[in-house]
Amino acid sequence: MKPNRKFKNNMFTMLFDNPDLLRELYCALKGVSLPSDAPVSINTLENVLFMDFINDISFEIGGKLVVLIEHQSTINPNMALRFLHYISEIYKTIIDSKTLYSTRKVKIPWPEFYVLYNGEKPYPEQEILRLSDLFEKTHDLGIPEKAFPLLELEVKVININEGRNEEILKRCKKLSEYSAFVAKRRSFYKELGKNKEAVTAAIKYCSNNGILKEFLEIHGREVLNMVITEWNTEDCITVRCEEAREDGHDEGIEKHRLYVLELLDQGLTTEEIKQRLTQKEN
C-alpha cells in the first residue's frame, strides 16, 4: 500500500519544514536555549507506514539528539507504541547495521518524543504517555510484576490550543500563530457552518492581521485544500467511530478508523468515502 501524501502533508508539517523553525520549536517545548548555529537535519520518515500513518516530523540536532513530533487533534493512547516503531526505523537510517556486530560501543542520538494536541475536547496542559501503560500484566501467569519496566518510552503531550501552555507559545512565534489560526478556523466554523467558508475566512483574517501572514500569502491555496481535507477526514473517522460506539462495538472502532484511512490511501475523496461508508452499512 502506498502512503497518501496529500493526506499526511498537512499545514503543520508544511509550516515547520525548516531547520531554523524546528530548532526554535524544540527550544520552546524543552524550555532550553541552543546556539543559533546548532545544526538541524530533518530525517522525517517518508516511506514507512504504521497504522496507515507516516510520522509528522523527525529531526536531529547536532547529531546528539533526535526529536520526533506528532501533531494531533485526537489523542491516541497508543502513541508510545507508534513512536517505538518510528524511532526504530529512524535509527536504521542513522546507523550502519554492520556496526551492531562491532566490539566497540555504538553511540546513538538521544531520543525525545512529543505530541502537540490542538483538539476541541478538553485535555490537560501536559501529560505523559508511557509504553509501559500498554504492557500486559503477568500476575495471572504467576510471574511477579517487575518493579520497573525493562523497556520504556515516554511521550510528552502538550496542549497547544490558544490560551494553554502560554509560556511555550510565547517562545515559539510560529507555533503561537498556528494556534491562533486553528482557533480562528473553529470560530468561523461556528459562525458560518461550512468547512470551506470557515477556512477561507480564517486565512483572510489571519493574513490581514499579521498571523502567519507571509506563509498564508504564499501557500494560501495549498493550506485551504490541506485543512479542508484534514478536517473532512477527521469528520469521517469521528462519525464512523461514534456510530460504532453507539452500536456497542467498541472493539471495532480502530477497524473502522483504519478502513477510512485505507480508502483515503486509495485516493478517494471525503464525499466518496462517505458514500462508501453508507453503502457498507446497507
Image (cartoon, rainbow, N blue to C red):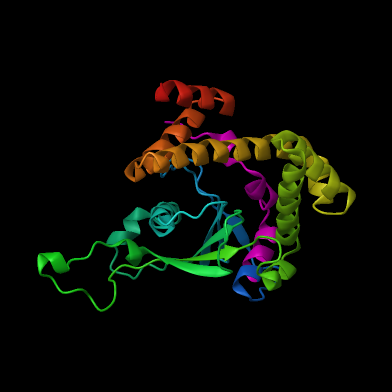
Image-based side of 107 in relation to 174, left or right: left
Vertical placement of 139 versus 227: above or below?
below
Q: Main secondary structure of the magenta part?
A: helix
**Residue at the farthest right position:** 208
Question: Is 189 within the magenta?
Answer: no
Residue 22: x and y, percent?
A: 65, 60
The front one of 234 and 146 is 234
Q: Quadrant of the N terminus?
A: top left
Magenta stretch, residue numbers: 1-27
Instruction: Note whether residue 232 is visible.
Output: yes
Residue 180: x and y, percent?
A: 75, 56
The front one of 102 and 211 is 211
Image-based side of 265 in relation to 271, left or right: left
Question: Is 20 within the magenta?
Answer: yes
Residue 21: x and y, percent?
A: 70, 59
Which picture quadrant has residue 34? bottom right
The front one of 183 and 47 is 183
Vertical placement of 203 versus 25: above or below?
above
Vertical placement of 88 versus 198: above or below?
below
Instruction: Note whether residue 63 is visible.
Output: no
Q: Quadrant of the C terminus?
A: top left
Name the residue rendered at 41%, 53% in the picture: 82
**Residue at the farthest bottom position:** 147
Residue 10: x and y, percent?
A: 63, 43
